[in-house]
Image (cartoon, rainbow, N blue to C red):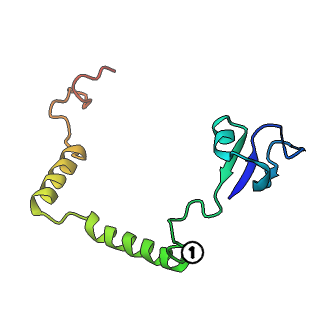
Amino acid sequence: MRLIANKPCSFGGQKFYIGDEIPENFVVDAKSQEKMGVITIVNDNMGEPEGQSGPLFTQRQVEAMIAKAVEESGKKKADSRKTVKNAAKEQADKLFSTEEPNETNTDGAAAGIQT
């Protein structure tokens, strides 16, 4: 456990400034000092589960797991159902249809366009 000063303070006859580490034996009641905002208590095993002495996975294991997940998600993205494909094709046909206007003027211009 480490004690870090949040404010300028004095323990054991010594002055400590923001960010300084305070020896544990200088502070009588560290928890109350932390509640008042004077210090921060930093556990040496912060972020690790109880009884855990090292990382859960190596970097190589994590990269392999990510690659496998990406590969599997790629297999699941395409939907091969016939109805979905047909509906998508119909929508594409509607959006990209190239129908010509039926009505033209005598000069060949499209109906509704004035020259």
Give the amino acid at mark 1.
Ser
Residue sticking out furthest to the right: 14
Which residue sits at x=57%, y=75%? 53
Q: Nearer the viewer, residue 56 or 51?
A: 51
Q: Quadrant of the N terminus?
A: bottom right
Is residue 39 shown left or right of residue 95? right
Residue depicted at 13% across the width and 63% down the height: 81
Q: Is residue 31 above or below residue 25?
A: above
- Quadrant for residue 13, please give it: top right
Residue at the extreme front of the image, as rendered: 28
Q: Position of residue 110 (x, y in %)?
A: 24, 30
What SS does tag 1 mark? Answer: loop
Q: Position of residue 3 (x, y in %)?
A: 73, 51
Looking at this view, is 54 or 21 the one in front? 21
| Residue 35 x, y percent position in the rendering | 63, 37
The residue at which mark 1 appears reads as 53
**Front-most of residues 7 and 30:** 30
- The quarter of the image holding the C terminus is top left
